[in-house]
Amino acid sequence: MAAVCCARLLSPGSVHGLRLGSRLLPVLSRVSLVRGHRLGPADDELYQRTTVSVMQKEAAGGAVIYSYSPRGFNVNGNKVFGPCAVLPPAVLQWNVGCHTDITVESLSLFYLLEPRIEVLVLGTGARTERLDPNVLNFLKKKGIAVEVQDTPNACATFNFLSSERRLAAAGLIPPPAVE
C-alpha cells in the first residue's frame, strides 16, 4: 500500500510538482528562500558596527639624535650621559660599558617592545666592532634586523630610519675622546 502511495506522489509524468492523486501541487516549481526576520546587529558579529577613534592625526616624527660626544648624546634636545637606548617611545640609559658587554640580556629591552621594532642600530664606539654571533642569531630569530656600526654612522643611520617612519631603535655607546 505504501509503495502505491509513493508511486502516486512521485509520478514520472509530473516534472514541476508532486502529483497527489489527480491533483498537481507546485511544490518545487518556485524555490525561494525567505527569512522570517531581518538580521540586526545583535544577530551576528559580521553585522555589528565597528568604531575607530583617531587619537592623533599624524604620528610623531620620532626621535632625532642631534649630537654625540665622549660624554653622551643629545636626543630630541635631552642630554643623555653615557651609553643610551633610543626606543620609539623613550630614551633610556643603557647599562653597557663597551661592545663586549652587549649580550642577549642587555638587548632584552629591545626585543620585548610592543609593537616590535624592525631594525636595531648598534653603535659600538669609535670603530665598528664584532659582536657575539649568538647574540646576532638570537635577534634574527626574534625577527629584528641588526645594523652594527661605529657610533657616528649609527646615529646617522638611526636618524635616516626614523625620518622614514620605520620602527627602529638604537643602542649607542659614546665614542672615546680623540687626543
Image: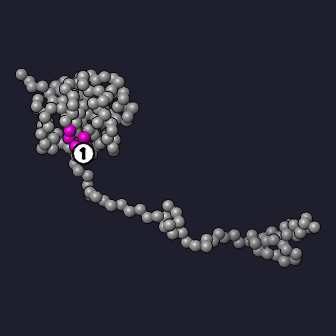
Looking at the image, what colour scheme do you see?
Answer: one colour
Q: In the figure, 172 relative to 31: above or below? A: above
- Decide whether residue 28 is among the magenta residues: no
Q: Which x, y percent locates residue 10?
A: 84, 67
Does residue 154 appear in the picture of this structure?
A: no
Q: In the figure, 39 relative to 171: above or below? A: below
Q: Image quadrant for the N terminus?
A: bottom right
What residue is drawn where x is 23% and y is 33%?
Answer: 171
Q: Which x, y percent locates residue 27?
A: 75, 72
Left-right relation of 124 to 136: left
Main SS category, magenta section: loop
Q: Which x, y percent locates residue 65?
A: 16, 39
Q: Which x, y percent locates residue 167?
A: 29, 42
At label 1, the amino acid type is: Pro
Residue at the far right: name it: 1
Residue at the far bottom: name it: 23
Range of residues picked out in magenta: 87-92
Hey, which quadrant is residue 50 in on the image?
Answer: bottom left
Disc count in the image? 1
What residue is drawn where x is 26% and y is 34%?
Answer: 121
Does residue 73 appear in the picture of this structure?
A: yes
In this view of the protein, which residue sits in the foreground, 34 or 39?
39
Hey, which quadrant is residue 51 in on the image?
Answer: bottom left
Q: In the figure, 104 relative to 4: above or below? A: above
Q: Name the residue under label 1.
A: 89
Residue at the far left: name it: 179
Q: Image quadrant for the C terminus?
A: top left
Hey, which quadrant is residue 159 in on the image?
Answer: top left
- Decide whether residue 89 is among the magenta residues: yes
